[in-house]
Amino acid sequence: MRDAKKRRVLRKAADLIETHGWIQYALGSPVQGFCAMGAIRHVLKPNFSFRFSPFRLPEQTREVVTYVEDHDVDLEPRGLTFWNDQDGRTSDEVVALLRRVGGSG
């Protein structure tokens, strides 16, 4: 997947969280809101089942998550999921990360 598409996915994921809300400790849905990874996954395949192991991510989701982790040093060493779920994290921080790495278009 090209970097331009990854950035588009991240901007759309930020839009999803702003529209549907943000959650921790679950991937989410349009009804309950999304975590960062759940929003990315939903952008890539809106009708997929959220019953999967985060250790077996679909390839496109893994590519976008790796792109985020490679472009933001604050996510080291544990990655996007751990960062999203940290106590004290806010939806504004999550949206800001997705928009920062996603760029302006």
Image: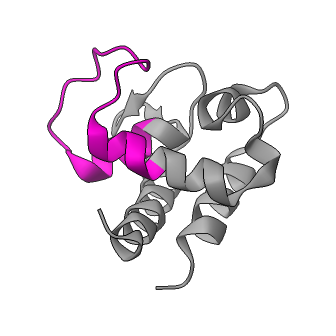
Image-based side of 87 in relation to 53, left or right: right
The answer to whether 82 is drawn above or below residue 42 in the figure is: above
Where does the image place residue 93, in percent across and percent down from the top left?
Answer: 74, 52
The quadrant in which residue 71 appears is bottom right
- Coloring applied to the structure: one colour
Q: Measuring from the top left, give residue 18's x and y in whole percent.
A: 52, 57
Magenta stretch holds residue 41: yes
* Residue at (74% x, 42% y) in the render: 75
Q: Position of residue 2 (x, y in %)?
A: 33, 70
**Tally of marks:** 0
**Toward the viewer: 1 or 37?**
1
Q: Which residues are magenta?
A: 38-64
Whether residue 50 sits left or right of residue 26 in the image: it is left
Residue plotted at (71% across, 55% down): 92
Q: Residue at x 56, y 40 (%)?
A: 22
**What is the quadrant of the N terminus in the image?**
bottom left
Q: Quadrant of residue 16?
A: bottom left
User: Quick one: which residue is furthest to the right in this view?
Assistant: 88
Q: Is residue 36 above or below residue 18?
A: above
Vertical comparison of 75 with 15: above or below: above
Nearer to me, 30 or 1: 1
